[in-house]
Amino acid sequence: MKTDLYQKITNQIVAELEKGVRPWVKPWSAEHTAGRITRPLRANGIPYNGINVLMLWSAAIEGYAAPIWMTYKQASELKAQVRKGEHGSLVVYADKMIRTETDKATGEEAERAIPFLKGYTVFNVEQIDGLPSHYYGKPALHVDGIERIERAEAFFAATGATIQHGGHMAYYNISQDFVQMPPFESFRGAESYYATLAHEATHWTRHGSRLDREFGRKRFGDEGYAMEELVAELGSAFVCADLDLTPQLRADHAAYIGSWIKALKNDKRAIFAASSHAQRAADYLNGLQPNTDERQGEAEAA
């Protein structure tokens, strides 16, 4: 009996949420030897996207500081060896099969593409002996002060979003199309401010003139509202990883965990959809940056 990859991955994430843990933030809370985790990278240096980011971040909790992952075959081609007893981590990609069907009414044949997931196993380079030394490089440990971070300032300025400051609430007003942020000085630190801004900037991408994202939201706190908040949380984590910032847990978002668990249990593809929308939002924000190099990786699960 074939493994249902959608269900397997959904169950893993639901299990974390039921513990009160958000797996897309957990890596930065761990006693991680390098201090922070960046986006996971393939053997060729191209970052993973979407659901695979969440899966490999969760796997990195085992204590891996290096961000690079590769297959057993890739390691062998580099004359390296996965250590005996090491367990790999699952990643997935979307594929499709073409099925020819006959219309019962007309007798005509037509081809139909049926999407499905394929999974394969990768190992962190710290599970592999004998690789060239540059594969074992670790993210540099650094601590940012409360001063503004120039790269983050430039990133959000380049989006062109209208960002207003004042009050004590952070939110996106879709009817007037602006992001509201508390004063910079009111945050615990610079990274907390930019992580919150990344969350609201992800909401900003849902406007009809941008990604036109809508989950059938009808009222505050309904399932569509919770789904958009999940997209914004994931989008913020992806953007923070791109900017080498530490994402922050916002206490006011803990109330959504129950709604996320319900949504994921009701639909095994929900976390894939949320990850895909979050990836599109992060890509959209990155695409607004000057001199952005577009990087294309393998097809990711939608």
Image (cartoon, rainbow, N blue to C red):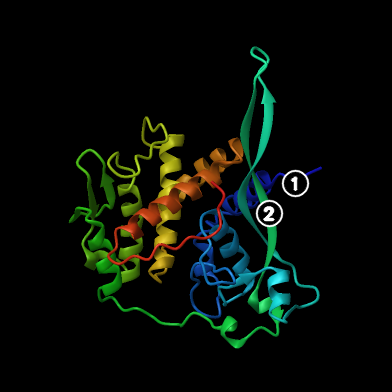
Left or right of residue 301: residue 227: left
* Residue lying at 70% horizontally and 78% vertically, measured from the top left: 128
- Which label's residue is closer to the chain start, 2 or 1? 1
Q: Which mark is residue 3?
A: 1
Label 1: element kind: loop
Report crowding for label 2: few under 14, some 14 to 19, many 20 or more residues within 10 A (C-alpha). Answer: few
Task: Please give the residue where the numbered disc 2 appears in the rendered image.
Answer: 119
Left or right of residue 145: residue 46: right
68, 190: nearer the viewer: 68
Question: Quadrant of the image for the N terminus?
Answer: top right
Give the CA distance from mark 2 to mark 1. 10 Å
Q: Quadrant of residue 168?
A: bottom left
Say whether marks 2 and 1 touch (CB < 8 Å).
Answer: yes
* Residue lying at 56% horizontally and 58% vertically, measured from the top left: 298
Q: Please, what is the three-letter code of the amino acid marked with disc 2? A: Gly
Q: Position of residue 26 (x, y in %)?
A: 53, 63
Q: Which mark is residue 213?
A: none
49, 192: nearer the viewer: 49
Q: Please, what is the three-letter code of the amino acid marked with disc 1? A: Thr
Report crowding for label 1: few under 14, some 14 to 19, many 20 or more residues within 10 A (C-alpha). Answer: few
Q: Position of residue 35 (x, y in %)?
A: 49, 78
224, 85: nearer the viewer: 85
Question: How many marks on residues?
Answer: 2
Q: Position of residue 110 (x, y in %)?
A: 63, 27
Can the viewer see residue 249?
no
* Residue lying at 24% horizontally and 65% vertically, measured from the top left: 186
- Nearer mark to the viewer, of 2 and 1: 2
Label 2: element kind: strand
Q: Is residue 35 above or below residue 175?
A: below
